[in-house]
């Protein structure tokens, strides 16, 4: 049905479907463009900016820009790599991230990107913001210290009638992720698990289970984040 | 309480997309949107409570805790501070016995700071219960607070109304127009219905062609060609909408205030013409909450237009229907961004949307929409009356027509001026009587800060584009402290927070400029600030976010010596201020707060 378009990423000839977002088309061609907020087939948020690429020389978010015939995409230039590293560093200083004590360690996309970009000491000063943990709902913890405002839970986790269980509260420096106490109480185990799984960091955690997959056997323990995509086409 | 809230919700047809109006209604009725009110609203609209809270918590004028019976919102933007805001704030605190951010024990009054309220030509200014008080002094504050304590109604506290329509019985504001220069496009005499009648004499394609011919470009600041925007939208099918952006929140801008006061009918006429051109039958004027004092007047203008058959059913007997409603904002700078404005009009947080799709394809309620500035619609009405070629002949090659600019700060005649595009900054400064000028902030905080050697540059989209804000900064000011730091505080407060770079970098940059102002920074900090500003510009999602580091980026470029004069000649300086960190504990134990020299 949909029209096939040809384009290049870092010089490599690629094919995609017209209207498909660049980040998804790249994945289909075995090229990894890092993401934190994007998930395939979910309305994009375009909020983490880590997928920023040059499209015909212009900086665009790969998760919100559709592929078009003949476009030239640059993904891994020194400038873009430094921008991505800066964004990762910025997320680390903005929140309070202590990987060794986090249940998500090894399965965390932010941590994975920290390793990928070889972040040592962030170039920015730490904010040391005080953020409250919400443990009131029966199925999950909301560990706000680790939230990176990707909006995945806001976009994907709804109750049986389509109402939001998660939403933003405040703006700018007062922004926080908020949880609806009443609706969260109705969450099934499956929905709670899904909420934890889509959270790219350790902000949403399912209660009553912990470290069911031991450290050492987790997604990014032995593989660099994105390598599964890069290896899929070799 | 519950019955009253339900009646407010029912007045808006139990429609969740009218959440802004519902929250506004509840806020004015009860002085807050309490958590109890949130429960009722969520229940009635069948949405989750967090969705009500996300809208409530986004806007400055919605509060979860009650404000005082008299809620004083004092403008703390740059020009207000220049004109003596600190004294005014001090007097309010002294007279009412509470600090800003607090409410008196008897719930009579509360004090709040707020971002630019569009009165930079008559600062310091405050809004008390939707009524604007301008040119405040300690004496005026004493009078106001005495009357608050006596329980006098705010609109009875004064009778010296401003000029023009400001003294109209439906406005009765002390605001002055300060309209100091009129021009041929906007402020020249206008025959009601003239542009509309001519437009209706052509087919819709010809109207768009006329606007294209005029070379009119968006007057909000971005300068997108209006005819092209209308053309894109006209090609889409189905229901469409016309939105007018009357949310001028860029500090130092107040020209739309005067346009809405004196040229409201022309604005609405422009909207009808836009509707006719693209094939829309509904228009929304998004009015910033700070201008609520104009709402009754604007509604009356709409009524008069209906009576004259310039609005409503079968306009001028040509079989075209068009209606306009006014959507009130609630205090959020970002809603001046067109897609954020649409989100807000739908009752949501004012977060900019991703593009594509563009509003012309999917705008209000996901239908094709055009969003244009107040002045753009005024110009469109004139263009239809006088012709595109007439308009094109005014101004410069790339910037046709006139520009209404708001000039404020250190000058003799702050106010609104309709100039031809192409005027130099030097000519502008002569026009307003400004001497000993250190800098001109062109186009507000998101624009650029230029220094005297650049005053030959021209106000034009191809050189110095502006949506209207021009702030003159005299030599007596501390540019980094009084201007740049204030701007960065503004952006840190006003970022919607949705996109990482704007949210977090502006906090980081605000702290960095504080470090410079306090004298703790080193050369490397300044270089870092310049580099980090670039990351914001390159990666942030919306236009406002991309320009939010401009106060720092453009002053580092044009006033580097001011930074150099303040930095320490060291290779390393910690961000951690030990002296400051131990201050409190030193006070407790009665030790001098000196850690080491």
Image (cartoon, coloured by chain):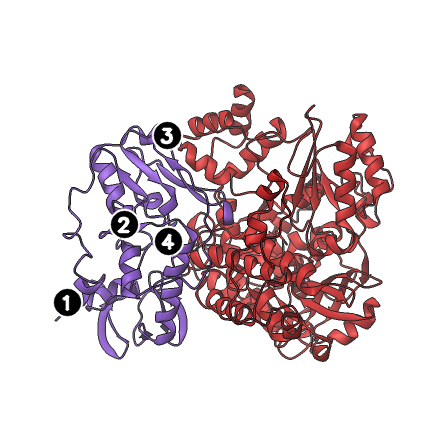
Chain colours: A purple, B red
* Up/down of B560 relative to B574, above or below: below
Find disc 4 in the rendering and name its residue: A45
Helix, strand or loop status at disc 1: helix
Residue linked to disc 3 = A181
What's the CA distance linking mark 1 and mark 3? 42 Å
**Label 1, residues with CA under 10 Å away: few <14, some 14-19, many ≥20:** few
Please provide percent x and percent y for residue A84: 36, 65
Q: Quadrant of residue B440?
A: bottom right
Nearer mark to the viewer, of 4 and 1: 1
Name the secondary structure under disc 3: helix
Q: Are marks 3 and 4 on the same chain?
A: yes
Q: Earlier in the sequence, mark 2 or mark 3?
A: 2
As helix, strand or loop, the secondary structure at mark 4 comes to loop
Q: Residue at x 57, y 37 (%)?
A: B62
Q: Nearer the viewer, residue A197 or B360?
A: A197
Q: Residue A156 is drawn in which quadrant?
A: top left
* Quadrant for the N terminus of chain A in the image: bottom left
Looking at the image, how many numbered discs can be counted on the residues?
A: 4
Q: Give the spatial CA distance, label 4 vs label 1.
A: 27 Å
Tell me if residue B86 comes above or below residue B16 in the rendering.
below
Asked whether residue B293 appears in the rendered view, the answer is: yes
Residue B480 position in % (x across, y down): 66, 64
On residue B560, which mark appears?
none
Q: What residue does disc 2 label?
A: A100
Q: What separation in Å lies between label 2 and label 3 (alpha carbons)?
A: 29 Å
Mark 4 vs 1: CB contact within 8 A: no
Task: Tell me the residue that label 1 is attached to.
Answer: A231
**Given the image, what chain letter belongs to the residue carrying mark 2?**
A
Determine whether label 2 and label 3 are within 8 Å by CB: no
């Amino acid at each position: 049905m949909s029209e096939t378009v040809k384009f290049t990423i870092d010089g490599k000839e690629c094919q995609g479907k017209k209207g498909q977002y660049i980040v998804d088309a790249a994945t289909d061609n075995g090229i990894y463009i890092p993401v934190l907020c994007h998930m395939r087939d979910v309305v994009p948020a375009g909020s983490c900016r880590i997928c920023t690429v040059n499209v015909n020389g212009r900086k665009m978010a790969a998760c919100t820009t559709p592929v078009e015939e003949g476009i030239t995409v640059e993904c891994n230039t020194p400038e873009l790599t430094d921008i991505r590293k800066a964004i990762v560093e910025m997320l680390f200083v903005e929140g309070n991230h202590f990987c060794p004590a986090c249940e998500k360690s090894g399965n965390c996309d932010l941590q994975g990107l920290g390793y990928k970009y070889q972040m040592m000491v962030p170039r920015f000063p730490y904010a040391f913001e005080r953020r409250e943990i919400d443990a009131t709902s029966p199925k999950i913890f909301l560990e706000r210290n680790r939230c990176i405002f990707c909006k995945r839970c806001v976009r994907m986790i709804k109750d049986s009638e389509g109402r939001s269980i998660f939403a933003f509260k405040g703006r700018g420096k007062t922004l926080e992720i908020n949880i609806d106490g009443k609706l969260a109480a109705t969450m099934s185990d499956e929905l709670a698990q899904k909420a934890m799984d889509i959270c790219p960091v350790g902000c949403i955690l399912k209660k009553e289970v912990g470290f069911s997959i031991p450290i050492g056997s987790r997604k990014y323990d032995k593989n660099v984040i994105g390598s599964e995509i890069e290896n899929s086409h070799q | 309480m519950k019955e009253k809230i339900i009646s407010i919700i029912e007045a808006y047809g139990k429609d969740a997309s009218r959440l802004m109006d519902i929250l506004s209604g509840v806020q004015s009725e009860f002085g807050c949107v309490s958590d109890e009110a949130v429960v009722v609203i969520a229940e009635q609209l069948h949405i989750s409570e967090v969705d009500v809270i996300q809208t409530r918590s986004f806007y400055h004028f919605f509060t979860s805790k009650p404000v005082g019976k008299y809620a004083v919102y004092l403008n703390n933007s740059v020009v207000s501070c220049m004109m003596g805001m600190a004294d005014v704030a001090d007097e309010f605190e002294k007279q009412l016995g509470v600090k800003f951010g607090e409410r008196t024990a008897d719930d009579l009054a509360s004090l709040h700071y707020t971002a630019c309220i569009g009165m930079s030509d008559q600062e310091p200014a405050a809004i008390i219960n939707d009524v604007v008080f301008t040119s405040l002094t300690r004496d005026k504050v004493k009078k106001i607070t005495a009357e608050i304590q006596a329980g006098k109604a705010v609109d009875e506290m004064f009778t010296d109304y401003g000029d023009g329509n400001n003294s109209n019985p439906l406005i009765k504001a002390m605001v002055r127009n300060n309209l100091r220069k009129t021009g041929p496009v906007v402020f020249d005499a206008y025959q009601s219905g003239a542009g509309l009648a001519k437009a209706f004499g052509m087919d819709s394609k010809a109207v768009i062609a006329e606007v294209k011919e005029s070379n009119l470009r968006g007057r909000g600041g971005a300068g997108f060609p209006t005819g092209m925007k209308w053309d894109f939208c006209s090609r889409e099918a189905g229901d469409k909408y016309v939105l007018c952006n009357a949310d001028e929140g860029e500090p130092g801008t107040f020209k739309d205030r005067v346009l809405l006061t004196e040229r409201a009918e022309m604005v609405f006429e422009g909207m009808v013409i836009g509707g006719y051109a693209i094939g829309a039958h509904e228009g929304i004027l998004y009015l910033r909450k700070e201008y609520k004092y104009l709402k009754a007047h604007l509604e009356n203008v709409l009524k008069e237009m209906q009576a004259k058959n310039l609005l409503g059913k079968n306009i001028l007997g040509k079989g075209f229907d068009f209606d306009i409603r006014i959507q009130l904002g609630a205090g959020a700078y970002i809603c001046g961004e067109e897609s954020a404005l649409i989100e807000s009009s739908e009752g949501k947080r004012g977060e900019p949307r991703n593009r594509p799709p563009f509003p012309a394809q999917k705008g209000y309620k996901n239908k094709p929409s055009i969003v244009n500035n107040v002045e753009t619609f005024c110009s469109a009405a004139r263009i239809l009356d006088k012709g595109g070629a007439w308009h094109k002949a005014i101004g410069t090659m790339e910037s046709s027509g006139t520009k209404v600019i708001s000039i404020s700060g250190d000058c003799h005649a702050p106010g609104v001026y309709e100039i031809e595009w192409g005027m130099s900054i030097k000519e502008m400064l002569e026009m307003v009587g400004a001497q000993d000028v250190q800098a001109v902030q062109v186009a507000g905080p998101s624009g650029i800060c230029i220094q005297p050697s650049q005053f030959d540059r021209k106000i034009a989209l191809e050189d110095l584009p502006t949506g209207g804000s021009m702030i003159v900064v005299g030599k007596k000011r501390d540019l980094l402290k009084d201007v740049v730091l204030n701007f960065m505080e503004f952006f840190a407060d006003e970022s919607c927070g949705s996109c990482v770079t704007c949210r977090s970098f502006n906090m980081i940059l605000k702290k960095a400029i504080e470090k410079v102002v306090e004298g703790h920074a080193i050369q490397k900090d300044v270089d870092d600030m310049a580099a980090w500003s670039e990351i914001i510009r390159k990666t942030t999602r919306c236009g406002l976010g991309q320009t939010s580091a401009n106060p720092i980026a453009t002053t580092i470029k044009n006033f580097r010596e001011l930074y150099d004069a303040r930095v320490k000649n060291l290779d390393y300086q910690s961000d951690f201020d030990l002296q400051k960190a131990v201050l409190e504990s030193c006070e407790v134990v009665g030790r001098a707060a000196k850690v080491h020299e």
